[in-house]
Image (tube, rainbow, N blue to C red):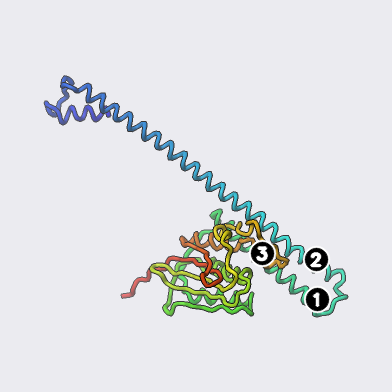
Amino acid sequence: SLFGVFFVNYVFTYPYMNFNFYLDGYPVTFIGMMLVSSITSTTTTRFKKQSRLLNQREKMLVEAEKETMRANLLRAVSHDIRTPLTTIYGASTTLLESGENYTKEQRIKILKGIQEDSDWLMRMVENLLSITRIDEGKIKIIKTPTVLDELIDSVMVKFHKRYPQQEVYLDLPEDIIIIPMDAILIEQVIFNLLDNAVLHADGMTELILKVFVLGKQVVFEVSDNGCGIEKERLNGIFNGSYHLFEGRTASSDSKKHNSGIGLSVCQTIVKAHDGAITAENNPVGGAVFRFSLNIEEMKESE
């Protein structure tokens, strides 16, 4: 403000390029500019303080939300892991203490139960590791061009190995689609969505994996014709807390619970790829899970 007053006096008042402090109204001009400067600086300072406070509040809210999600996941995981561990312990103890009293077929059945629960626990741990490492920034997403057909083939091999009796109807683009992604992590997303349908879509007779191009994005869609998702659970279905709603029915089948951790992993991985994931009920019955990824822009070869 002070510099402005002298600059105006020196450059724009007569005699030009000389100072003249005897001009009429010059003190008023000086005081006016000083007042404007003071008001502006005070307002700016208050605005900056308010912005810092808002940023701090937003950070606190984000941290509080993360802590709530962690607490929900911890409670859920602790509850659901206890069941298969109890089953494995009981079955192994039975075989060790009185295995000779069972027939070969009965022992094989018990061992298969141990194997299935162990496999469930291993997948649970893999999902937990994935979500915690990405959240903490320990995993750096390295995107490499991946052919869509090869990605789906890899997922189907793993899925049919896990569920040999479950048929999946594929609806894929005829054109060759190349997507920049971490293929291993996106495979985990697709597998988790298919696995979720098998475990939770009661009454399902049809499971569909559809992929289509929409603008500059490729959309993956997993749909079923099962029981669908309760409306009150839709909002929290990706944060690991959807099953904590009042009214959750317990099941004696440990494989029916995955604490929502698989869907939490899906959201974390898709977000890390700058994509989006949603869930909704199909109007004709069942549920639809959808996530999108950006397509690599192919340069035409000359």
* Of callouts 2 and 3, the N-terminal one: 2
Q: Which residue is mark 1?
A: 107
Q: Amino acid at mark 3?
A: His
Q: Which residue is mark 3?
A: 257
User: Which picture quadrant has residue 199?
Assistant: bottom right
Asked if the residue at tag 3 contacts the one at tag 1, i.e. Cβ–Cβ closer than 8 Å, the answer is: no
Residue at image position (24%, 30%) is 4
Asked if the residue at tag 3 contacts the one at tag 2, i.e. Cβ–Cβ closer than 8 Å, the answer is: no
- From the viewer's perspective, tell me whether residue 86 is left or right of residue 200: right
Residue 49: x, y in percent?
43, 36
The quadrant the N terminus occupies is top left
Q: Amino acid at mark 1?
A: Arg
Residue 100: x, y in percent?
87, 75
> Could you tell me how far apart the alpha carbons at marks 1 and 3 are, in whole angstroms?
25 Å
**Residue 263, placed above or below residue 22:** below
Question: What crowding class fits label 3: few (fewer than 14 Cα within 10 Å), some (14-19), or many (20 or more)?
Answer: many
Question: What crowding class fits label 1: few (fewer than 14 Cα within 10 Å), some (14-19), or many (20 or more)?
Answer: some
**Residue 171, placed above or below residue 17:** below
Mark number, residue 241: none
- From the viewer's perspective, tell me whether residue 247 is left or right of residue 113: left
> Could you tell me how far apart the alpha carbons at marks 2 and 3 are, in whole angstroms?
19 Å
Question: What crowding class fits label 2: few (fewer than 14 Cα within 10 Å), some (14-19), or many (20 or more)?
Answer: few
Residue 213: x, y in percent?
42, 72
Residue at image position (65%, 54%) is 74
Q: Which residue is mark 2?
A: 90
Asked if the residue at tag 2 contacts the one at tag 1, i.e. Cβ–Cβ closer than 8 Å, the answer is: no
User: Which picture quadrant has residue 35?
Assistant: top left
Q: Secondary structure at mark 3?
A: loop
> Could you tell me how far apart the alpha carbons at marks 1 and 2 are, in whole angstroms?
13 Å
